[in-house]
Image (cartoon, rainbow, N blue to C red):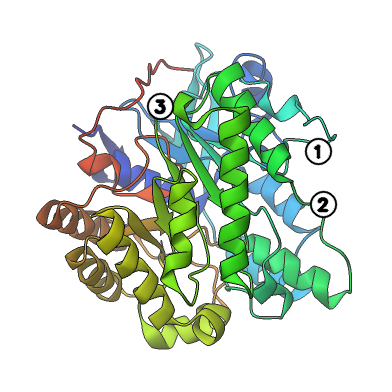
Amino acid sequence: MLTKYSFDGREIDSLDLKSLIVTRGVRVSDRVYRAFGESSRIDPDPLTCNCLILPDGTVAQLTDISLHLRYLSHAMSLESLRKLGTFFQGLKPFSLGLSSSGRAVLSYDGEPITEVGFPEKSRFYEQETSSGLPFLGNAVLQGVDTLTFQSLWPCALARAGLACQFCYTGGISEQLARKHKLEPAIPTPRDVAEIVDYAVNKEQAVDHIQITGGSTMNPQAECQTIGRMLREIDSVAGLGNLRGEVIVFTTPPSDPRSIDQVFYAGADRVACSLEVWDEELAKVITPGRVRFTTRQRHFDTLRYIAREYGPNAACSTFVVGLEPVESFLQGARELAKDGIVAMASLWVPFGRPVMGSAKAPGLEYYQRVKHGLAAIYQEFGIVPPGERGSTSAYARTSVCTRRSRSISWRPA
């Protein structure tokens, strides 16, 4: 049962609160970093992907607005920053401070909402691979149970000037290409395997692995690269030591059978993400996907995976908050009929403006998504990946029935 809270004169549950935290951000008191930095995983560096844990175990991405804006100033165009500046002027974020007893308390507009906790302290971000590649900036501990590689190689679509509008990483690649600058060094399969080995075996901090690279112009070769990476992970860390799943996000190949090698190498699920269901909006928001990889190729690959590897093996992320609720739920239902998982990832509006706007929808929008998506999952037997550790995925908590890592919550 989800915990109930009083927010702005209304009663909301933990998923409602999560949607608001993720899309509005938080102003974190320096006292919180000083009080809990030595005992919990909370750090003023935005690259560490902070999160907070609500009393029922719901995990929400914790973006410190002040630090985030400073970080963005080094990586975004002046025009995008101006648009974000307009957004921040009208923004009323949450605040995170200390109570008189020294506990971490989430508040809104001066009114306390709830005490919160943080994940256990980790030394993950202090590590380097044997080649000298730092973990920080190349992988994140997401939530309480997931190791995520967010961009293992540059997005070719972004470098061609066709980045998805919401994608912060793609925006950076687009800016670098315009300035004729090189991308940072990318991890090798050995680097990735050593990072996994540390998180899974040495710290025993994660149950699930997410592998993501930028979209490439040669998806067949991309599948081969992922296959080599998974085999190296198995050799170094042992995929059998993982309590949960490996989910791979990849560009759909022209021949869906190329995906077989990804599953043979150890993936449990493969996602070829459409991001936006509404076709006209997709042309504007995801121009590279529409023009080069095409919606039809996404459908062909997803249906091939569902047919060959069973229901719930094929996934597609949708960035929720960019299109009407009805459009997204229509897409989720159409995919669910074929056993394909539609995953809702909350749009973080202060990452990058979309169609000139950096304003997320209101609470009612996310409540409709929550109820509609949960109903679709139940009707078609859809089981999304992850457990209770994803920081921005939505509606997973409300339908989670599988055994998950125990989250021992205590007030921070």
Classify 285 as above or below 243.
below
Label 2 is placed on what type of residue? Ala
Residue extending farthest to the top is: 101
Label 3 is placed on what type of residue? Arg
Considering the image in quadrants, where does the N terminus appear?
A: top left
**Which of the two discs, 2 and 3, labels the residue nearer the N terminus?**
2
Report how far apart the C-alphas of labels 2 and 1 lie in the structure.
8 Å
Q: In front here: 202 or 394?
A: 202
- Residue 260 place in picture, x, y as percent: 43, 58
Position of residue 46 in the picture relative to residue 383 (left or right): right
Q: In front here: 100 or 359?
A: 359
Q: Residues within 10 Å of mark 1 (few under 14, many from 20)?
A: some
Classify 365 as above or below 255.
above
Q: Are marks 2 and 1 in contact (CB under 8 Å)?
A: yes
Residue drawn at 52 percent across, 57 percent down: 348
Position of residue 171 in the picture relative to residue 230 (left or right): right
Q: Which residue is mark 1?
A: 133
Q: Which residue is mark 2?
A: 185
**Which of the two discs, 2 and 1, labels the residue nearer the N terminus?**
1
Classify 313 as above or below 26.
below
Q: Is residue 207 visible?
A: yes
Report how far apart the C-alphas of labels 2 and 3 lie in the structure.
30 Å
Label 1 is placed on what type of residue? Leu
Disc assigned to residue 92: none
Q: Residues within 10 Å of mark 3 (few under 14, many from 20)?
A: some
